[in-house]
Amino acid sequence: MSASFKTIDSLDFKNKRVLLRADLNVPVVDGKVSDATRIERIVPTIREITKGGGKAILISHFGRPKGKVDKAFSLEAVVPAVAEATGHPVGFVDTDWVDVDKARRAIESAPAGSILVLENTRFHPGEEKNDAELAKRMASLGDVYVNDAFSAAHRAHASTEALAHLLPSAAGLAMQAELEALEKGLGNPKRPVIAVVGGAKVSTKLELLGNLVGRVDALVIGGAMANTFLLAKGIGIGKSLAEHDMGDTVETILGKAEKARCAVIVPVDATVAWTFAANAPHQHYGLDAMDPEGMILDIGPQSIERIKGAIDEAATLVWNGPLGAFETVPFDAGTNAVAKYVAARTKAGKLVSVAGGGDTVSALAQAGAKDDFTYVSTAGGAFLEWMEGKTLPGVAALLKA
């Protein structure tokens, strides 16, 4: 994919109105942005636009106002954070997207090199319906379109999909970095490839597991979903969390993996406790001697070593989901140990590592390993759909014909 999508090198920004689809859907607490990561990631693209003599006109959704004007979801709240991240004054244009004349006048009167934030695109019901008329109204405000919001690329909305077909369009620098990292992870990876998948439920990751077993050489299963795999293999898991009705599904996944010659690695031992609480009394058990009263809350030391051995053989790793109850000490030990090992191999130039998904980002940050992975995606749903092998409408709209 990386060779075939349009990048901003192909656009001329001089005296152009540049509609920049950003993801400004950031957490706001007491009227202030509490985590500006997504804003910081688009700063290089904003700078390229303004340095090139264009006007950067940011459009984004924010929360779920359900197609109505609701000031509780006004993007005005994020403007100070955009100004701080860019080190540049930022204007705000209050538009309801029914009549964009006010926005047009504000854009026309702004000098070259300006940065403007337009009001929440979801204040109009046509945004989530990918409405052609709304997209035309949006397009009338710009000369070129840049999408730097990979995290919204899995949605076919007016500002992410329809709009891209109406103006000369390209991927912003953050979107480009994400797509190139994903290409290295699964699109055209250096082999062997290992995937690490954790989390609570097999049922929420069926499409993911089904896609991965056909594309990777080894698949590590962790978290509570590993219990469902163990249960399906007839291994006692005591009182551990598991999906008892997913046995046939697990068998199907394992059968598909066998056909594709993908090794599936499940835990061989576990960290077991009898109550789920921080620093609860716990013990390591081999899975052949599991206490029927115990709960598996993390992988055990032998499983950690087994996973490290599999990682040693890999050239590329993709990761989604923690390997245990990582929010609760000491059941973060497995995730921490594996994350640090991946980070060290990546830093040593022996591994390309790509990770993503909300819990995953938190778990890698907690392990102190996040900054040493090749790429960590903050895109959530879009990252998961990419791992599932789905076409993302916002990316497809940027592909070269």
Image (tube, grey):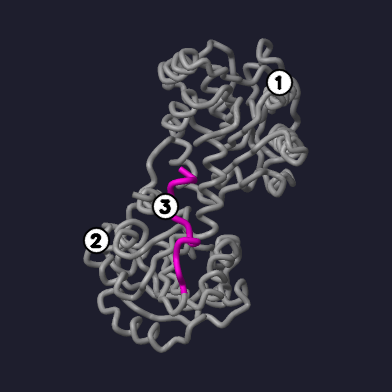
Position of 307 relative to 176 (above/below): above
Residue 361: where, in percent of width, then height?
A: 61, 47
Quarter of image, res 273? top right
Q: What is the magenta range?
A: 1-13
Determine if the magenta segment contains residue 2. yes
- In the picture as drawn, the residue positioned furthest to the left comes out as 133
Quarter of image, res 43? bottom right
Q: Residues within 10 Å of mark 1 (few under 14, many from 20)?
A: some
For label 3, the residue is: 153
Residue 114: where, in percent of width, then height?
A: 50, 81
Looking at the rendered image, the disc whose residue lies closer to the viewer, 1 or 2, is: 2
Quarter of image, res 327? top right
Residue 337: where, in percent of width, then height?
A: 74, 34
Q: Residues within 10 Å of mark 3 (few under 14, many from 20)?
A: many
Q: Cα distance, mark 1 to mark 2?
A: 51 Å
**Lateral position of residue 107 relative to residue 186, left or right:** left
Give the mark, 2 or 3, whose residue is nearer the N terminus.
Answer: 2
Q: Secondary structure at mark 2?
A: loop
Q: Which mark is residue 306?
A: 1
Q: Cα distance, mark 2 to mark 3?
A: 16 Å
Question: Looking at the image, which residue is at 47% across and 57% down?
Answer: 7
Question: Looking at the image, which residue is at 49% across and 60% down?
Answer: 172
Q: Amino acid at mark 3?
A: Ala
Camera sees residue 331: no
Q: Secondary structure at mark 1?
A: helix
Give the mark, 1 or 2, whose residue is nearer the N terminus.
Answer: 2
Q: Which mark is residue 131?
A: 2
Q: Amino acid at mark 2?
A: Asp
Q: Residues within 10 Å of mark 2 (few under 14, many from 20)?
A: some
